[in-house]
Amino acid sequence: MYFVFAFLSSLVIGILFFPVLISVFQRYQISDIPGGRKIHHTSVPSMGGIGFFVATGISMAIWAWEFPAVETPYLLGGISIMFFVGLRDDIVELSAIRKILGQLIAVILVVVVADIRIKSFHSFLGIGELNLFVSYAFSSFTLLALTNAFNLIDGLDGLAGTIASMVFSLLGVWFYYQGLNTYSILSFSFLGGVLSFMIFNWHPAKIFMGDTGSLTLGFTMGTLIIVFMEHNVGLPVGNSWKIEPAFAAGVALMIYPLYDMGRVFVRRISQGKGPMSPDKSHVHHFLMRMGFRHNQVSLIVGSLQLALIVLVILMKDFSDNLVLPIIVAIAMILGYRLDSLTLKYLKKRVALQPKVLEIKRIKIGQRTRIQLDKNEFEDSNVNLN
């Protein structure tokens, strides 16, 4: 039951702490200013990641010491480094190179020092055990991709929190039933912190998580997904908790951030832009153009991701060679359908708008003469000269 206490501790601490954090940010005018590609129309305090980082840290300090693991200090150290990289970027914007270098320090601490890495493809694409340096390189790339993919979807009230809550709750339950108590407590501590944040981030948001929060959550979820994949393949065949398509399960847990990142990168490069150039080509931007509100978009995207996760669970006895192409194909088909529907909707909307240069002559019968009585202005302050 420790995971329940960890969850409740983090949730309560976050609920108590966030109003204080919001008040401090408002007092010192530490806010995200609207404009440009930003969707919000008023100044909203940012760096809400501080709130659930503090809540999670306190909860872990209370409960995680019961289940020490060799890699735990390095994992927590990597999460802390990623938190401060995001904090620095929110306060004083970092260049892309410096930001990646800071992230690499956290990644190396987890992949190399803590030895949390993808060690084998387990016959996926006919590939088995990976060379040590190939394992380091592939695991580092994967962790960086998952971290930054999640960072990119943080552009809508409640969206990033919805995806994170789903991932932490599913992984937390799986770790608990496998006896991986440290990872279970970490998952549920973050879950409590994120849910307390969503109380104040649900539309209309009173606070944003900023890079402080999105990088921290993306990195933590990416690390836990790698842990899940490696422990999952070690389960004996026939175990009810074993998911045979381990890669497909890992991808499904972050399918929306990964698809959205790949989608916007391809669009930007095809338009001659840099892949990291900011714009409004994300999936949530397209859904907003179709008239959906913030909370509706968050629920739609979350429901679609959950449906793909359930599909992988239903196909848990099949191999990655079958399941992974299926979920990737479904994601791409849904994305293509969204693009076509959005384009059709916008064309219809534009067609209904009056033409700018379309000025109709007023017929004589429609003209009206305005008659004014001069006496009405005698006691007025209006200058009649």
Image (spheres, grey):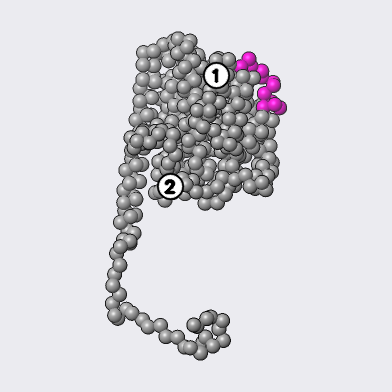
The residue mark sitting in front, 1 or 2, is 1
Front residue of 149/318: it is: 149
| Pointer 1 with pointer 2, Cβ within 8 A | no
Residues rendered magenta in the picture? 60-72
Spot occupied by residue 72 in the image (x, y as percentages of width and height):
63, 19
Q: Residue at x 67, y 48 (%)?
A: 27
Front residue of 120/185: it is: 120
Judge left or right: residue 98 versus residue 67. left
- The quarter of the image holding the N terminus is top right
- Residue 307 visible, this angle: no
**Amino acid type at mark 2:** Met
Q: Is mark 2 on a helix, strand or loop?
A: helix
Mark 1 or mark 2, earlier in chain: 1
Q: Residue at x 48, y 88 (%)?
A: 374
- Which disc number belongs to residue 108? 1
Q: Quickly name the residue at label 2.
A: 288
Spot occupied by residue 340 in the image (x, y as percentages of width and height):
32, 43
As drawn, the residue found furthest toward the bottom would be 375
- Residue 154 visible, this angle: yes
- 114 up-or-down from 160: above or below: above
**Amino acid type at mark 1:** Ile
Judge left or right: residue 290 versus residue 184. left
